[in-house]
Structures are given as C-alpha cells and as structure tokens.
Image (cartoon, rainbow, N blue to C red):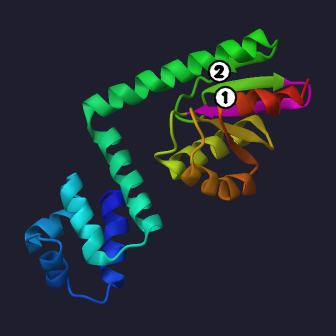
Amino acid sequence: MNSFAENLNYLIRKHPDSISTIALNANLSRPSLYDLMNGKTLPKSRTFTQLCTALSLPIISVQKLERLIKSEKVRFSRKEQQSFITQKKSLFDEVSALLFSMGHEISSSNDQQNIDLIIRLKSGRLPIKISPSLNEPQSILGSLLTGMYQLSAKKGYVCISKVKNHEKSLNSLFSYYGIKIVSTKSLIKELNQYK
C-alpha cells in the first residue's frame, strides 16, 4: 500500500458515511474506490476532486493528498522519475558550483541514498541533501539523520529549488533534529556564518 492509499484509508475510515455512500457521492463504483484505498490505482484529477468533495476535506488535507499523489507518480512514472533526476542534477550542479566558488571545501557522498554533499568546516562536516521538492519528507529526513549520524554532525540541510508554504510547515519537524529546509540562496547565507 502506498502513502496516498494509507492516508485516504484513514480519511475514509474516520468519515461518518459508509464506503458505499462515499463512493456514490464521489461518482465512483465501490470497486474503484477500493482500488484507490488499496493502492492499486491513483485518481485522475476529476476523480480526486469528486472524492475530496464527497469527504468534505479541508484544504490542508487536500494539499497533503495532492503531494502524496505527486510523490507516487514520481516513484512509478518513468517520465516523472527522469524529470526529477534532471531537476536534481541541475540543482546539485548549481549548489556545488556556488559553494566551490565561495571557497567551501565540498565533497560528494559515496552513499547516494543518504546525503548528496558534505561541506568540511573547522568545526566538523555538514551534510546536505539536495532535492527539487519535498515530495517524500519522511525519506529525506531519514536520509539526513543517517548522514548526520555517520558524520557525527549536529546540523544538516535540505536544499530545495524553492521553499513553498507546505515545506515551511515541515521546518519545525526538521529543525527539531537540527535540520533546516532552505533554498540555494538561503543555504549560501547560512554557510556564510561559518567562514
């Protein structure tokens, strides 16, 4: 079961209407709704809108489900994966070039599952995870925590293309562990304090 399906299951189970009523109100057949709930399919745009309306979801829940759908599409769609990889490589190159031009000593991580860049400072090393967006915040958080543990670092950074509102809301969770979600520009400002 994928993250979208898990979240949808939770929302449907806590809803006062029966599954049959929810399916009817969303103009879905029960088998189609069960396919969504079991992670066999992802909803098309119109179906998603009808389902959110049938469940009377607040905007924050709708946005979370949209992010989860996007995350699942990136994970399973070859085209989306290629686009994500291209965007990540571009952001990686941009951040690396900027840090190098500022005189920072940087290296790439051998373990691509955890962190992307390591900055060597007088006080130790800082791990950086680079991602075009925070589609999978739990995975990114876990990767950085593993990287911080391996480097004995007390701080880490997630560098994304642009920090959006839903990513700002994750900052309190990440900062609890000593990790900041930053854009390229903000990362440069942050690292200037270590010079």
**Mark number displayed over residue 163:** none
Q: Residue at x 12, y 78 (%)?
A: 24
Apparent side of residue 32 relative to residue 121 in the rendered image (left or right): left
What x and y, as percent, mark residue 84? Answer: 41, 30
SS at mark 2 in the image: helix
Q: From the image, which quarter does the C terminus lie in?
A: top right
Q: Taking the image as drawn, is residue 11 in sight?
A: yes
Q: Is 126 part of what is drawn in magenta?
A: yes
Helix, strand or loop at mark 1: helix
Q: Up-down: is 103 above or below 176? A: above
- Residue sitting nearer the eye, 123 or 130: 130
> Do callouts 1 and 2 mark residues in contact (Cβ within 8 Å)?
yes
Taking the image as shown, residue 195 lies to the left or right of residue 128, namely: right
Q: Position of residue 100 (x, y in %)?
A: 74, 12
Q: Is residue 38 visible?
A: no
For the magenta stretch, what is the residue range?
121-130
**Residue at (81%, 23%) from the top-left corner?**
120
Estimate the spatial distance between the alpha carbons at disc 1 and disc 2, rounded to whole Å: 6 Å
Q: Quick check: 159 above or below 105?
A: below
- In the image, residue 68 sits, relative to residue 92, either above or below, namely below
Residue lying furthest bottom in this view? 16
**Residue 184: which disc?**
1
Residue 126, given in percent of the width and then of the height, sits at 76, 32
Q: Which residue is mark 2?
A: 95
How many numbered callouts?
Answer: 2
